[in-house]
Image: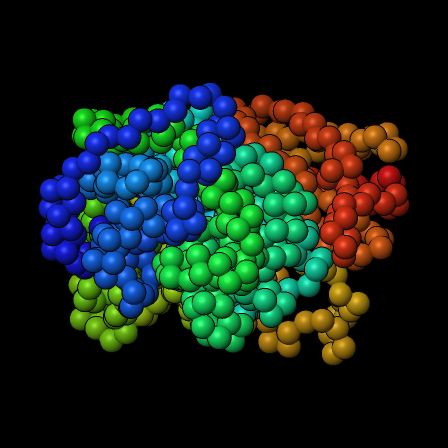
């Protein structure tokens, strides 16, 4: 639970609610959802229709600024009148059941509520943060992780998650990169789809599947200078080719809901953007579900300078196709009057309500509104051992080995005297990450505990705190910038040890919503701690915990072994220990470029060539005078305890039909391991300039030592084409080159004509 406000208010509310029992409503068993929706719609008053378009926050777990309208009495009265269609931030079978009972038994038509929550990387049992999961490039594991999240959340009354976030982002300063799948639209689309499949399953009406929500439509990941909620200003080519594809893929895979965004796009807030919501999403892509606003994004149009008051907010949003209002109070206050005044056609209200009711029918809420509120299932399923096993598997696969000079890793069990240093090493809360709403604090296995399973020779010294004071989702962090009092003990321990494992990085709440940073090195005094320890013992394994790419050029230059361990959720310590001791051979690859310096942000592998890409020691070319253009660790990069060699790249072209690419990969090391082979394409001359490289295929597989595998990729017009500036998909003949390799910078190249 992230912020417990008003718990007493909630209890009072529930008591009041329980005292007013009404007759249970009888629901039609007509198999035809559309007919049932029409039947219901025909019985609804205008206010009841608007009510379906209104979502209220529960009474605790605030995930946004609390609006002044949101007092409990209003909500209770509105709920009883049928003026509320959905609630967010209510969870737990008992609490959801009570809310649902009011909607079903005390309102005139008894339409059940749909309960939404940010089930982002697990509910009780937490998986790695989504950016970490994406580094696995393992779609099956990612789908399974979302499945586990859905099973636990649905057992606690939740039937709708505000996930996956499919915003592409290239800027490590933006704290919400932790919630996405990185900088690439091709991979991001597939990961988004895997998550949707995991949440929604094959049968949405099953009691353990929940509706997913692709968010934030559109452009939120391109907040200027990486500052959350900031202005977005992108060109059409980026919009069509980078930002839209994961949303389009989500729609094609039947995502039930889409969330719009806080930002403006070409001066028009996404929530009031009819072009985005009606023309592109609903008409062009044929999206059948409903659009939810982001938290108060309607209301925020006043601050954007786009609406003069809440009434205009309601008019603009409803006309633009934003179907449900999260915490703006605009629809519930003004929409019915706007319809009566002729400013919003009732047909538009009907369309929105149809969409919302359809999802409720599909979830089975009309058959059994309490389907998701079974206290017994809740008890049996949360923190289930199977779920822990699944998130452990996911956590291991998410770890990326960034450096391993002199093969310091893996550690051997017989290794004597391992020093473990860093506050994050002994933390069982921070590794839960930022979006742990619903879960319980301090439930992660710490690295210190994880290492115990392998070696009794580990001695621990904190060195320095990363943060001090309260740590919570909605509370600013207090970084320790001064206290070095623990350094001496850490240095003493390091001096007498064979090897030092240092766990450094960001606190779990240092990334996520509203957590943008301009300094993306190690926060606080941790860099000083690292350097102080290095002075007495150079055998350092640096285990990084962070929710975004960090810029760590000093560490890369000096520290022999670096392991990117993100925030890995409930089973963090076991996953890290398995990798450090070699029980699991790391296989993760970065899905965001790690810069050398924050000044390079936004930095991404699929950039354009520019007119002046090279220039040696000269002045007039596209470069920095004081830093390389290259990232420290590129997209797709990650090492293994074995090595892989690439050979015999072959390309066969069937003009107009397909291009077949094959390559031989050999495990040239001494351990079995998994490789992610990546195929990048470059369209050399096009009617709209194309990036220097674009990921168009990947395969993850395991090879025994010495084993060789021939991989085959097929490129069809889908991979060879692109969107022009009118948003039309075109495929142009001409010269291409492609690269197949182990990351976005290393591989074998070939040219071909299509
Ligand atoms: C605001 C966030 O932007 C959104 O992603 C989230 O789902 C809502 N708050 C609800 O918590």
Which quadrant: the C terminus? top right
289 or 65, which lies in front?
289
Would you say 750 lies left or right of 259 here?
right
Residue 466 image-quadrant placement:
bottom left
Residue 468 image-quadrant placement:
bottom left
- Relative to 21, say whether 550 is above or below: below
470 or 158, which lies in front?
158
- In percent of width and height, residue 589 lies at 51, 44
- In percent of width and height, residue 722 lies at 75, 47
Res. 567 visible in picture: no
* Labels in figure, total: 0
- In percent of width and height, residue 126 lies at 31, 41
Task: Give the image's coloring scheme.
Answer: rainbow
Would you say 644 lies left or right of 662 here?
left
- In percent of width and height, residue 125 lies at 28, 38
317 or 474, which lies in front?
317
Query: Which residue is found at the position 65% from the left and 42% from the top?
Result: 285
Query: Which residue is found at the position 17% from the left and 58% from the top?
Result: 6
Would you say 96 lies left or right of 403 here?
left
Would you say 251 lies left or right of 585 here?
right
Query: Which residue is found at the position 38% from the left and 61% from the top?
Result: 333
Query: Which residue is found at the position 50% from the left and 57% from the top?
Result: 339
Res. 339 visible in picture: yes
């Amino acid at each position: 639970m992230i912020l417990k406000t008003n718990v007493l208010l909630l209890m009072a509310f529930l008591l009041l609610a329980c005292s007013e029992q009404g007759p249970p409503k009888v629901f039609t068993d007509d198999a035809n959802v559309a007919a049932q929706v029409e039947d219901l719609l025909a019985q609804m008053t205008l206010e009841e229709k608007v009510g379906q378009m209104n979502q209220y926050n529960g009474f605790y777990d605030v995930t946004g600024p609390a609006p002044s309208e949101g007092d409990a009495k209003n909500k209770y009265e509105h709920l009883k009148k049928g003026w509320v269609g959905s609630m967010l931030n209510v969870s737990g079978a008992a609490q959801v059941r009570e809310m649902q009972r009011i909607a079903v038994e005390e309102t005139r038509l008894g339409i059940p509520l749909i309960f939404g929550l940010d089930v982002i990387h697990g509910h009780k049992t937490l998986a790695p943060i989504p950016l970490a999961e994406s580094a696995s490039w393992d779609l099956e594991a990612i789908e399974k992780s979302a499945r586990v999240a859905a099973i636990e959340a649905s057992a606690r009354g939740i039937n709708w998650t505000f996930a996956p976030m499919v915003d592409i982002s290239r800027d490590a300063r933006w704290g919400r990169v932790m919630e996405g799948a990185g900088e690439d639209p091709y991979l991001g689309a597939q990961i988004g789809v895997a998550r949707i499949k995991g949440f929604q399953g094959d049968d949405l009406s099953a009691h353990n599947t929940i509706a997913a929500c692709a968010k934030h439509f559109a452009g939120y990941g391109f907040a200027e200078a990486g500052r959350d909620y900031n202005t977005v200003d992108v060109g059409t080519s980026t919009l069509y080719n980078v930002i839209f594809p994961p949303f389009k893929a989500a729609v094609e895979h039947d995502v039930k809901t889409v969330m719009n965004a806080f930002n403006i796009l070409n001066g028009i807030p996404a929530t009031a953007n009819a072009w985005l919501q009606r023309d592109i999403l609903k008409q062009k892509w044929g999206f059948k579900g409903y659009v939810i606003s982001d938290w108060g994004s309607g209301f925020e149009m006043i601050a954007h300078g786009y609406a003069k008051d809440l009434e205009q907010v309601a008019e603009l949003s409803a006309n633009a196709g934003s179907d449900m209002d999260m915490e703006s109070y605009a629809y519930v206050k003004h929409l019915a009057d706007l319809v009566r005044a002729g400013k919003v056609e009732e047909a538009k209200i009907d369309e929105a309500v149809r969409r919302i009711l359809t999802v409720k029918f599909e979830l089975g809420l009309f058959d059994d509104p309490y389907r998701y509120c079974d206290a017994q299932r809740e008890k049996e399923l949360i923190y289930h051992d199977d779920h822990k096993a699944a998130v452990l598997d996911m956590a291991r696969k998410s770890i990326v080995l960034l450096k391993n000079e002199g093969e310091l890793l893996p550690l051997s069990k017989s290794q004597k005297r391992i020093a473990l240093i860093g506050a994050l090493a002994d933390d069982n809360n921070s590794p839960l990450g930022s979006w742990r709403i619903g879960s319980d604090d301090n439930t992660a296995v710490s690295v210190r505990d994880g290492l115990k399973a392998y070696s009794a020779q580990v001695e621990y010294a904190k060195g320095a705190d990363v943060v001090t004071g309260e740590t919570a989702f909605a509370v600013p962090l207090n970084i320790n910038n001064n206290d070095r009092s623990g350094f001496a003990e850490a240095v003493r321990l390091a001096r007498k040890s064979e090897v030092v494992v240092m766990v450094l990085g960001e606190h779990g709440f240092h990334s996520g919503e509203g957590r943008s940073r301009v300094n993306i090195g190690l926060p606080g005094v941790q860099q000083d701690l690292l350097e102080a320890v290095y002075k007495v013992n150079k055998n350092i394994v640096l285990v990084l915990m962070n929710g975004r790419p960090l810029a760590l050029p000093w560490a890369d230059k000096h520290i022999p072994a670096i392991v990117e361990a993100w925030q890995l959720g409930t089973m963090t310590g076991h996953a890290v220990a398995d990798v450090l001791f070699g029980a699991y051979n790391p296989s993760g690859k970065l899905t965001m470029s790690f810069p050398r310096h924050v000044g390079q942000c936004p930095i991404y592998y699929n950039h354009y060539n520019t007119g002046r890409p090279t220039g040696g020691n000269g002045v007039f070319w596209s470069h920095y005078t004081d830093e390389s253009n290259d990232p420290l660790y590129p997209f797709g990069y990650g090492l293994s305890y074995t090595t892989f060699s690439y050979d015999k790249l072959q390309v066969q072209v069937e003009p107009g039909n397909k291009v077949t690419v094959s390559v031989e990969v050999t495990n040239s090391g001494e351990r079995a391991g998994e490789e992610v082979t990546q195929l990048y394409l470059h369209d050399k001359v096009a009617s709209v300039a194309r990036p220097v490289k674009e990921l168009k295929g990947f395969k993850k597989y395991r090879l025994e030592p010495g084993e060789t595998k021939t991989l085959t990729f097929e490129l069809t017009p889908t991979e060879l084409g692109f969107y022009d500036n009118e948003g039309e998909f075109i495929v142009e003949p001409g010269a291409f080159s492609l690269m197949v390799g182990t990351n976005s910078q290393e591989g074998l190249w070939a040219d071909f004509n299509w």
